[in-house]
Amino acid sequence: MIKNAMHNISYGLFVLTTNLYKDNGCIINTAIQVTSDPDKICFAVNKENLTNVMVTESKEFNISIISQDADFELFKRFGFQSGRSSNKFADFEDFGRASNGIAYITKGTNSYISGRIISAQDMGTHTLFTAEVTESAVLSDVPSATYSYYHSSIKPQPQKVGTAPSGKTIWRCTVCGYEYEGDELPEDFVCPLCKHPASDFEKIIR
Ligand code: FE
């Protein structure tokens, strides 16, 4: 991966949740407060995410702010599967309900913010939503996790452990830790967990 200035922008990490005909949510890394009188926030969501479609229609959402004590499991549950093919809240108990009736995440988060959409701007791949804050609460004093903190301390770390007797080559996704076995990683390979491309994989020889 070629490092450029865009990679040095700091980002937080959040679980954006909503409810229309069911609970759903996804991980986002762009959410900012834009005004404080009254409180308004902006956030961007990929248009391919079902959560985007649901927020567009329901106009109501919660943003749970992910903290440094979050498990990788939280990212797998809300980031590496689609709400179209799975129920992300199945067998999940780490959530409460805000006054708007929408779930917020109670484990690995330090706050949640409820909001109502004021406007939505089509940005091509993403929608940029602006919203008024309708409710908020602090859940813990654990510092918020940044995107770089996620990479350094939450996701599984690559380990170069030499050559194994099998001589197998492992290609590991630097975003989520998924491992592909094979001498060569196909150029058009897409991570089945987090959907990142082959360029986000690194070669590990065991
Ligand atoms: Fe991945």
Image: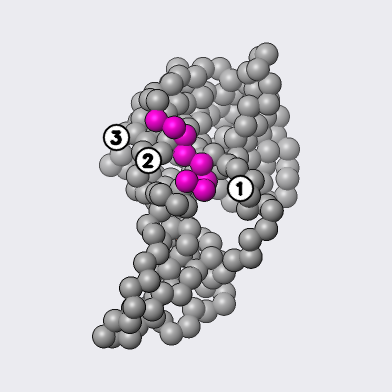
- Residue 85 inside the magenta-drawn segment: no
Question: Which numbered disc flags the more N-terminal residue, 3 or 2?
Answer: 2
Please tell me whether mark 3 sits on a helix, a strand or a loop. loop
Choose mark 3 or mark 2, whichever is in front.
2
Left or right, 46 with reference to 114 = right
Question: Which numbered disc flags the more N-terminal residue, 1 or 2?
Answer: 1
Rendered location of residue 11, percent (x, y):
58, 42
Can residue 45 be spotted in the picture? no
Please tell me whether mark 2 sits on a helix, a strand or a loop. loop
Choose mark 1 or mark 2, whichever is in front.
2
What residue is rendered at 46% in x and 75% in y?
203
Stretch of the chain drawn in magenta:
142-149
- Quarter where residue 53 is shown: top right
CA separation in Å, label 3 and label 2: 15 Å
Query: What amino acid type should be assigned to the residue bearing mark 2?
Result: Ala
Name the disc covering residue 70, or none: 2
The answer to whether residue 15 is above or below residue 170 is: above
Query: What amino acid type should be assigned to the residue bearing mark 1?
Result: Asn
What residue is rendered at 36% in x and 30% in y?
106
Rendered location of residue 166, percent (x, y):
28, 85
Residue at which label 1 appears:
46
CA separation in Å, label 1 and label 2: 23 Å
- Quarter where residue 29 is shown: top right
What residue is rendered at 65% in x and 22% in y?
40
Name the disc covering residue 160, or none: none
